[in-house]
Image (cartoon, helix red, strand yellow):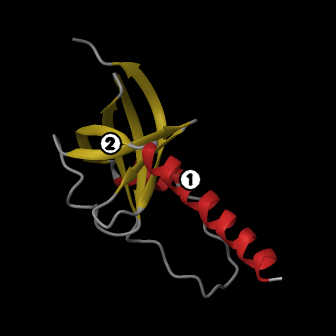
Amino acid sequence: MKTNIILPAVLSILVLSVVCGAQAANYQNGKIVSVHQLKADAQAAQQPQARSESTDAPLKNDVKKYEIVVETGGTSYTCHYLAPSDLDPGWANGKSVQVRVEDNVVHIKNANGKDEKLSIVSSKPVSG
């Protein structure tokens, strides 16, 4: 009876460790080429119009939009990122970062190891 419980538990742990290891292996070294904050009018154009309905949701006045260019795997990705607070200080020109590219999103690990998603605006091969 105990083996009926132990065997599935051991198999579950093995599967989880393989899946987690595979996800970590998808990250590769990358470099931030440039970072600059987009102008306030460009940010306002991207935000939805205010509604007349009342809400308890917090105001998003402190959200800032950045354009970040990241190079990895021989490709340069121009991305947009909405930062809910100050930008991670590790995200500066020339800094090395852990990067994972998936469809139209670049994932970058921040200083705390959290995965941040950046929307890819364009990409091109790195020359020379």
Residue 35 place in picture, x, y as percent:
25, 44
Between tags 1 and 2, which lies in front?
1
* Label 2 neighbour load within 10 Å: few <14, some 14-19, many 20+: many
Name the image quarter holding the C terminus.
top left
Write down the residue under mark 1.
Answer: 18
Q: Nearer the viewer, residue 19 or 110?
A: 19
Q: Nearer the viewer, residue 103 or 48?
A: 103
Q: Nearer the viewer, residue 44 or 104?
A: 104
* Amino acid type shown at disc 1: Val
Q: Is the residue 79 above or below the residue 3 in the image? A: above
Residue 97 place in picture, x, y as percent:
27, 47
Q: Is the residue 128 above or below the residue 10 in the image? A: above
Residue 68 place in picture, x, y as percent:
32, 42
Secondary element under disc 2, as helix, strand or loop, is: strand
Please say whether residue 7 is visible from this viewpoint: yes
Name the image quarter holding the N terminus.
bottom right
Q: Is the residue 34 above or below the residue 53 in the image? A: above
Q: Residue furthest left?
A: 94
> Quadrant of residue 69 in the image?
top left
Q: Which residue is pictured at 27% across the width and 63% down the height? A: 111
Q: Is residue 59 left or right of residue 3?
A: left
Dot 1 or dot 2: first in sequence order is 1
Write down the residue under mark 2.
Answer: 68
Residue 53 place in picture, x, y as percent:
70, 80
> Quadrant of residue 78 in the image?
top left
> Quadrant of residue 84 in the image?
bottom left
The total of numbered circles placed on residues is 2
Secondary element under disc 1, as helix, strand or loop, is: helix
Q: Is residue 104 left or right of residue 37?
A: right
Label 1 – label 2 distance at C-alpha: 32 Å
Q: Which residue is pictured at 49% across the width and 78% down the height? A: 59
* Amino acid type shown at disc 2: Ile
